[in-house]
Amino acid sequence: MLELLPLVGIVLLFWLFIIRPASRRQKEMRTMQSSVSVGDEIVLTSGVYGTVRELDDEHVHLEIAPGVTIKVARGAIGTVNHAPEPSEPAGTDESDAVADGPEEN
């Protein structure tokens, strides 16, 4: 029985350092891929950049250039940059006014 203790320790360390972190990363990746919405900018695992134009259950329609849309699997999504929140138009705040000329020293 005592000779099995090192084997059990190795299995425990393998689970702790290899299997558990990998399953956590997979869960985070699935969550990220399911949180994609129309208008998000994404990068596929192949390195293709684009903007989400339409969503299906298993696929994403990605605009990679103006007028060019491709259909990809959700599993191919590597990273997501969520669409920015709409804000007030630039130049409406008086403190953002630009000086009319360069400053002279």
Image (cartoon, rainbow, N blue to C red):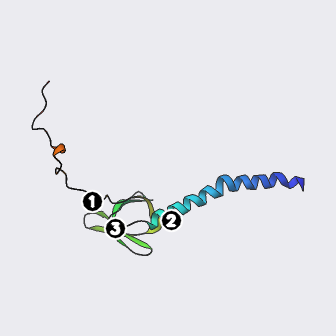
Q: Which residue is mark 2?
A: 30
Q: Quadrant of residue 86?
A: bottom left
Q: From the viewer's perspective, is 21 left or right of 78?
A: right
Q: Amino acid at mark 1?
A: Pro
| Residue 100: percent from left, percent from top | 9, 38
Q: Which residue is mark 3?
A: 38
Identify the residue shown where x is 28% and y is 67%: 68
| Residue 50: percent from left, percent from top | 34, 61
Count of marks placed on residues: 3
Mark before the other along the chain sequence, 2 or 1: 2
Identify the residue shown where x is 16% and y is 51%: 92
Out of 103 and 38, give the one closest to the viewer.
103
Q: Is residue 93 above or below residue 24?
A: above
Residue at disc 2, secondary structure: helix
Q: Is residue 52 above or below residue 94?
A: below
* Real-space CA distance between mark 1 and mark 3, rounded to the nearest whole angstrom: 14 Å
* Real-space CA distance between mark 2 and mark 1, rounded to the nearest whole angstrom: 27 Å
Q: Quadrant of residue 22?
A: bottom right
View extreme (top): residue: 105
Residue at disc 1, secondary structure: loop
Q: Amino acid at mark 2?
A: Arg
Q: Residues within 10 Å of mark 3 (few under 14, many from 20)?
A: some
Marks 1 & 3, CB-CB < 8 Å contact: no
Q: Which residue is mark 1?
A: 86
